[in-house]
Image (spheres, rainbow, N blue to C red):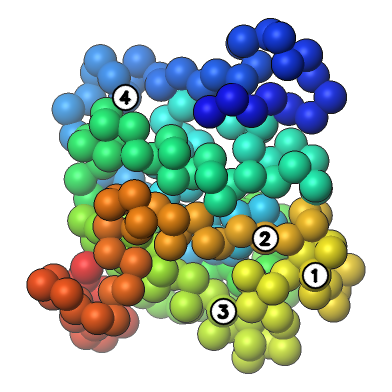
């Protein structure tokens, strides 16, 4: 993906390439990932797909280097669609015991009780797109209950009632774009040939 951090030398190919880690390419045959239920200032929410992309390659800062050069929409699906990544990530176990609905992904200590809540759920999925869409819906429902805008409408140049947004507009649409690339089923509610069940706040996709 020909993208460099804003202001850097566009002729330096070290800046516009990302490389997969040797742990991913040479050591592991299959990967079970453990994302956490949380919002994200640039990606909207960060779950399975962002872990797959930003956790498997280097030079990821270029995807959201400044408030106005946020391209998580493109970067996350493009990295996650790499054959090595998409084939080796076989199971996602999302820790939804405690969620973050604002100020993620860090939930700093001084804000932990302010923007986190006890959701008390574990979510299991072989489909990272469906899982992240479920996460998006959960986070948005909590934000609505707290009188905050949905993540797709939040940003410095969009809705920022707390004056805390760091990027012009958040980009949770990376989940839909990943679905369009065949990484999973975005419309998880349609149940198109797949089984989706929710029982005692445990989701299997």
Circles 4 and 2, Cβ within 8 Å, touching? The answer is no
Query: What label sits on residue 170 in the rendered view?
Result: 2
Residue at screen point 29% across, 51% down: 183
Question: Where is residue 187 drawn, in percent x and y?
Answer: 32, 73
Mark 1 vs mark 3, foreground winner is 1
Residue at screen point 69% across, 41% down: 64
Mark yes or no: residue 7 visible.
yes
| Neighbour tally class for label 1: few under 14, some 14-19, many 20 plus, Cα within 10 Å | some
Marks 1 and 4, how far apart at CA: 37 Å
- How many numbered marks does the figure carry? 4
Marks 3 and 2, how far apart at CA: 13 Å
- Residue 177 in the figure: left or right of residue 198: right
Nearer the N terminus, badge 3 or badge 2?
A: 3
Mark 1 vs mark 4, foreground winner is 1
Nearer the N terminus, badge 4 or badge 2?
A: 4
Question: Where is residue 104 drawn, in percent x and y?
Answer: 65, 59
Nearer the N terminus, badge 3 or badge 4?
A: 4
Disc 2 secondary structure class = loop
Disc 4 secondary structure class = helix
Marks 2 and 1, how far apart at CA: 9 Å
Identify the residue under disc 3: 140
Identify the residue under disc 4: 24
Query: What label sits on residue 158 in the rendered view?
Result: 1
Circles 3 and 4, Cβ within 8 Å, touching? The answer is no
């Amino acid at each position: 993906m020909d993208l460099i951090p804003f202001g850097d030398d566009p002729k330096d190919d070290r800046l516009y390439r990302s490389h997969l880690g040797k742990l991913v390419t040479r050591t592991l045959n299959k990967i079970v990932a453990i994302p956490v239920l949380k919002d994200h200032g640039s990606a909207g929410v960060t779950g399975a797909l962002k872990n797959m992309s930003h956790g498997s390659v280097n030079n990821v800062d270029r995807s959201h280097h400044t408030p106005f050069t946020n391209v998580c929409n493109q970067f996350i699906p493009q990295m996650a669609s790499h054959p090595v990544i998409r084939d080796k990530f076989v199971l996602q176990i999302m820790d939804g015991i405690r969620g973050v609905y604002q100020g993620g992904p860090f939930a700093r200590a001084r804000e932990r009780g302010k923007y986190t809540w006890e959701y008390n759920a574990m979510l299991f999925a072989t489909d990272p797109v469906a899982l992240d869409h479920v996460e998006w819906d959960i986070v948005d429902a909590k934000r609505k209950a707290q009188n905050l805008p949905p993540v797709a409408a939040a940003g410095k140049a969009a809705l920022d009632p707390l004056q805390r947004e760091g990027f012009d507009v958040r980009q949770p649409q990376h989940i839909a774009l990943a679905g369009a690339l065949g990484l999973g089923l975005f419309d998880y509610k349609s149940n198109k040939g797949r089984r989706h069940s929710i029982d005692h706040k445990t989701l299997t996709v």
